[in-house]
Image: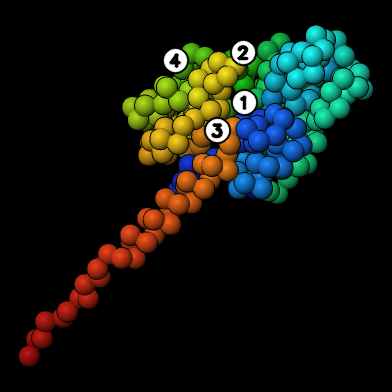
Amino acid sequence: MSGFWTNSQSRSLIGGHRGASAVAVENSAAAFSAALAGGADFIETDVRLTADGVPVALHDADLLRLTGTPRRLADLTLSEARQRCPGLLTIPEVLQLAEDRAGVLLDVKLLEGDDLSIFAQGLEAFARPSVALGLRSLDAVDALDGHLTDCPRLGLFRDIAHYPALAVRGGTWARLWQSDATPDAIARLRDHGLRVIVMTGEPTPDGVGEIEDRDLADLLDRAPDALLLNDPGRAVALRRQRQAHSSAASSAEPHHPIVKRSTS
């Protein structure tokens, strides 16, 4: 998996958004295991810090949506957070689940320099090229300059006009939302030397990572470098079906032998 995010690919990579969050609780061991079992090329998870500085896999700043407890994660130690959310995983635990099986994309929700420094220290022993850092601003990219150097940088910017500056800073991937992922937009980012990952669905609580079969097929036709959705197994199956169809069509093409003319 050493060159996962840097090797050239002949197909769009498929990732599980918060694991296979369509079939199991998001960011849980069950969700990540389901994504891997379904053939996902990589898993994505969110990163936040507990009060004692442990990076954990949690999307929201608090536990209200998942547990009904309106407590901020930043106010709880890992032990206290797990009392309220027993399935909460640390980021090293997530990386261990995926090791040698798939790549990992970390959606780093941290914005402040001090938090990013704590995160970098906590992840130093686990940094490797198969783990991409999804960063939400150029300031975050700058804050991690010189840290976790083995991990590729992936931009999760709201303003896509900032992506050329990411490339200048050594970033290698850029995120587009499905509605923005036109062939022209993908081509422009590639002109800057960036690979493109498409987040399916819409940036709303009920829409992130959700996509209809028809739209999924259309998105695969656009051939982004990677795509992210809540049900990665469905995309893997469609990709496999298309590859089988393409191979069958290729083998069915008539082959005309070359006949050499006689020189006598």
* Quadrant of residue 205 within the rendered picture: top right
Q: At label 3, which amino acid type do we have? A: Leu
**Could you say whether the residue bearing mark 4 is in a helix, strand or loop?**
helix
Could you tell me which residue is drawn at 69 percent across and 25 percent down? 46
CB contact under 8 Å: marks 2 and 1: no
Amino acid marked by disc 1: Gly
Residue at label 3?
Answer: 228
**Above-or-below relation of 143 to 22:** above
**Which of pointers 2 and 1 lies earlier in the amino acid sequence?**
1
What x and y, as percent, mark residue 72? Answer: 80, 10
- Above or below for 140 versus 17: above
Residue that label 2 marks: 139
Q: Secondary structure at mark 2?
A: helix
Characterize the local packing of mark 1: few (<14), some (14-19) or many (20 or more) Cα atoms within 10 angstroms.
many
Judged by depth in the image, the label closer to the viewer, 2 or 1, is: 1
User: Is there a contact, CB below 8 Å, between mark 1 and mark 4?
Assistant: no
